[in-house]
Amino acid sequence: MQAPEQPADLQVCRTGTARAAANLGRMSDVRVRFCPSPTGNPHVGMVRTALFNWAYAKHTGGTFVFRIEDTDSARDSEQSYQQLLDALSWLGMSWDEGPEVGGPHAPYRQSQRMDFYKDVAQRLLDGGFAYHCFCTPEELEEQREQQKAAGRTPGYSGRCRDLSAVQRAERLAEGRQPAVRFRMPGTDFTWDDLVRGPLTFAAEHVPDYVLVRASGEPLYTLTNPCDDADMEITHVLRGEDLLSSTPRQIALYDALAKIGVGNGTTPRFGHLPYVMGEGNKKLSKRDPESSLQWYRDEGFVPEGLLNYLSLLGWSIGDDRDFFSMAEMAEVFDVADVNANPARFDLKKCTAINAAWIRELATDDLASRLERYLIADGALPEKPTHAQQALLRRAVPYVQERMETLRQGVHMLAFLFATDAGIYDEVTVGTPAFERDAADVASVINDDARAALQAARDALAAAGEWTHEALEAALRNALVEGLGLKPKLAFGPIRVAVSGRRVSPPLFESLELLGRERALARLDDLLN
Ligand code: GLU
């Protein structure tokens, strides 16, 4: 099933909206960024990073910058770029600066900032902070092998670090294209990580590294700190997998300050804990439940998904699991993020989603379900007023019974399905009614036939078509009359009229379906 669109003005914040909005009005100079690469589908780890940055910006009254790191032309795609924009919009996380909205540091797509990187690389070379490296991949591999054999940490050997002008000219004359390599200062690096506390990397573990490939392509190692400096980012909150790039980036920051890129200050870094999936392995992009699209297709609501993701490494305290993003933003501080790996628990995520679905107002839930019913083909592209009215009447009966919107679609589609030979306003443009074959097989037998026949007669004779009257008539005919246990009496009727063993409550379902269609479905199964 295709995930439908959510409204742009998503109500992320049903509770506490006004109060938080008042807080959020204040401004500070905190500037955070979410800067994914457009390769593949957005995944939940990425959303968690975006959320923590967004919440920190909201909490501090700072600025949430959205930047696209699309410097890898071989892996980046326009489709993935659109998916990223769409993902943040669906989640209701609006950005203050970035693609579409612009801002003082535009453009916010790295593919459009190439001249800037080229210029910075040249200035780093001119200032002696970087050098041309002529080593070929084979030579680099050889160096690594030698280092390993000598029991040393593999890393760049420094071979091209101090080439003379003559030596450089010779290599160029050989037709070698140089990469630009950053000259690490050879000191240990310490920073006070906002999540993990003081961290030190020994100089020997942070060798000189490439900023620009021999092909002229600038790498993440250059573009990311350059943009963070240029965009005056104050706090870098990102996944722990990037921890090892931080000392290199801090060194580059110092050099950038010296050549006048940015405002001369280094951001504070906070590394968000790993998210572990099944079997205590890092949640992998290949796990289906790691893809944001999976949640959209299943009918998770953004409120529910974000609420759950916020718990991956953070807590609002007091054993509270259920809160809005506005409530999160009101209190969120990076200092409270837990450094221990977080465990992804789909059951809990689903339970929180169900709680959010129960929280929605009837009209809101009806319009969200409508989009899923349309996407699933159970309703036409433009539902009629009669269809919308029926959906709205049905929503309160399923709201407590579903964990995802998709489950709601499964429970409600029967109300709109067309019955052979019956014209009805609620079945305009909808598919024919069908029953789940396995559900039919599991409840329909000879006893069930007798019960269905009795039910058909009782319903045909029912005066008022209200769920109360229908319940009384059916209980009278089947439980008192035939002496059947309620489960045996009503199970077959449920499958006959809704097509499934899981449906909204039976008597209410019959009322919503109407006399003519209910009788037609019973007759159809009896025949
Ligand atoms: N583009 C990088 C990524 O997607 C951003 C890393 C960072 O936040 O520094 O992993």
Image: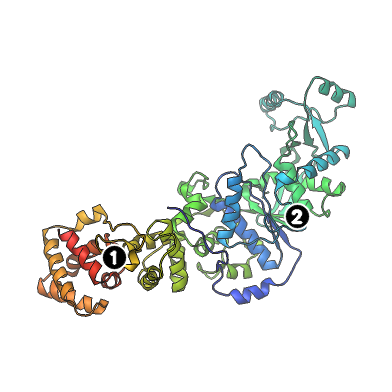
Q: Quadrant of residue 255?
A: top right
Q: Which is nearer the eye, 404 or 362? A: 362
Q: Secondary structure at mark 2?
A: loop
Q: Position of residue 446 (x, y in %)?
A: 11, 59
The three-letter amino acid code for the residue at tag 1 is: Tyr
Q: Which mark is residue 451?
A: none
Q: Position of residue 124 (x, y in %)?
A: 84, 40
Nearest to the eye among marks 1 and 2: give it.
1
For label 1, the SS is: loop
| Displayed quadrant of residue 64 | bottom right
Crowding around mark 1 (Cα neighbors within 10 Å: few <14, some 14 to 19, many 20+) is few
- Going by the numbered disc 2, the residue's amino acid type is Pro
Mark 1, residue position: 423
- Residue 491: in sight, yes or no? no
Decide which of 272, 430 is in the foreground and name it: 430
Asked if residue 129 lies left or right of residue 370, the reply is right
Where residue 221 appears, x then y in whole percent?
72, 42
Examine the rendered structure and indicate whether residue 373 appears above or below residue 279.
Answer: below
**Residue 105 higher or lower than 513, as above or below:** above
At 57% across and 51% down in the image, what residue appears?
83
Disc 2 residue: CB within 8 Å of ligand 1: no
Number of numbered discs: 2
* Left or right of 384 in this view: 329: right
Q: Which residue is mark 2?
A: 267
User: Disc 1 or 2, which lies upstream in sequence?
Assistant: 2
